[in-house]
Each structure stands twice: as structure tokens, then as C-alpha cells.
Amino acid sequence: MRKYTLVILTLVTASSLFAQWDVSASMGLDFKSMPTFRDYININFSSAGNQISSFKSAVAFGTEADYKLSKNFALGVEYNLQIDSYNGNGSTYEISYSLHRPSLMAYYIIPGVGYQFKLGGGAGYRSVSLSERIITETKYTASGFGLVFKAEGNTMLANHFYALIGGNLRYDSTGDVTNGSQKIVNNSTGDKLNLNSISFGIYLGITFTF
């Protein structure tokens, strides 16, 4: 019993010695392959000179809070938002979406004097809000899950403040977008519209530590 007590006390002491929070905010670009979304637009609403390519860029915003359990390991929560839109057919057609990507994260940390590197990954719930306008506007939603892998570096700017640069690889599975029982169907292929995607992104931001 005494042995187990010593082990627990050692773990608690180590955790308190390295207890530290990293809170960050960032903005970046995702390069995404979203096949069902791409094919639906290209086949039905896109002119020959305005086709969506296999990989399309989208803006992403992120914020995160990580707690260091030791100098080399941290757990955290990330919230990431990807937004994109498309206009076609002489502005008579418009589609836009917001993809919400919260994730629980785990990191291996390589610390240094005035810098730190973080490598990690996580998973979480995915939520979609999509709006399509063909004469009138209709709103759709969807939900699913996703995976994310990240590598980022932090360089000290001032006491407690770091410049952040990073990259990520994501897989998001959202399921079909719906409005009640109504779904969007690509009549040429029979596919129902979803925002399932693979993406890689780069981002810049600021980290505050305390």
C-alpha cells in the first residue's frame, strides 16, 4: 500500500511541477478534397471556366487550450472553424457552409529555450451549417466525426507570448446534409451531398502561456 501511495504522490508532484497552460488563436488556409461537394457543383452549377479543382482552398480559424501534464506531454481542447462558399451561373446560384471541428487533443512536446515544438493528434465531433440559394435560400445541417494530426512550432516574442506556425492533416466525415427529411441529391450521379473531406492546412497565430 505504501508503495502505491509513493507512486501516486510522485505523479501528482511531477504534474504540479510542470503544470502550465498554453492558449492559442490562429488563422490559416486549408487545402481540401471534398469529392461529393465538388462533383455536385461542377456537374450542376459550374461553367467550364469556373470548375472546382480536386483540391480547393478554404479559410480556417482556430483556438485551443492545452494543459501540460509534464514538460513533454499535454492534453487539450481545440475548436476549429472552416468556411467556404461558391457562386455560379451568373450569381443566380450560391452555396456556402461552416464546418465546426472541436477536438480533444494529445501532444508530445519538445521544449527549448525560447521555443517549443508540439506533435500530436486528436478526434472529435463535427457539425455543418450549409446554405444553398437557387432563387430562394434553404438551410441544411449535418453532423459526424473527424480526426486531426498537427505539428506546430512556437517561438518566444516576449514573456509568456509566442509566435505560432503550424500544419495539420484532417479527415472529416459529416454525413449527408439535411433539412428535416429533405436532402440534396446530385441527379446525375444519385449521390447525396455531404462534406466528407481530407485536407491539409497551414496556419499562423499567437500562443499565450501561464
Image (tube, grey):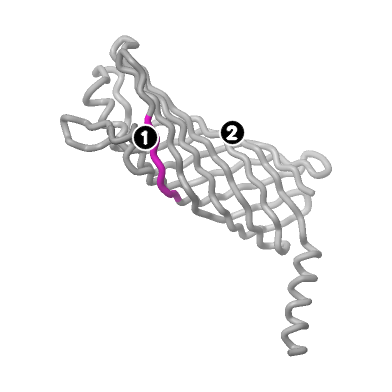
What quarter of the picture does the N terminus occupy?
bottom right
Q: Count of labels shown?
A: 2
Point out residue 120 in the picture as x, y percentages from the top left corner.
56, 56
Query: In terms of image quadrants, where is residue 183?
Result: top left
From the viewer's perspective, is the residue at label 1 or at label 2 nearer?
2
Point out residue 197 in the picture as x, y percentages from the top left corner.
37, 42
Residue extent of the magenta highlight: 140-146
Which residue does the image show at 40% across and 37% down from the upper left? Answer: 32
**Amino acid at dot 2:** Met
Query: Which class describes the residues within 10 Å of circle 2: few (<14), some (14-19), or many (20+)?
Result: some
Query: In terms of image quadrants, where is residue 194?
Result: top left
- Answer with left or right where residue 210 lies relative to residue 57: right
Which residue does the image show at 51% across and 45% down from the upper left? Answer: 168
The residue tagged 1 is 55
The Cα atoms of the two marked residues, 1 and 2, are separated by 19 Å
- Front-lying residue, 37 or 167: 37
Which residue does the image show at 71% across and 57% down from the upper left? Answer: 111
Q: Is residue 96 above or below residue 141?
A: above
Q: Is residue 71 above or below residue 175?
A: below
Element assignment for label 1: loop
Which residue does the image show at 69% across and 46% down from the upper left? Answer: 154
Element assignment for label 2: strand
The residue tagged 2 is 27
- Front-lying residue, 20 or 130: 130
- Answer with left or right where residue 54 lies relative to residue 10: left
Point out residue 71 in the picture as x, y percentages from the top left corner.
73, 62
Query: Residue placed farthest to the top in the image?
Result: 90
C-beta proximity under 8 Å, tags 1 and 2: no
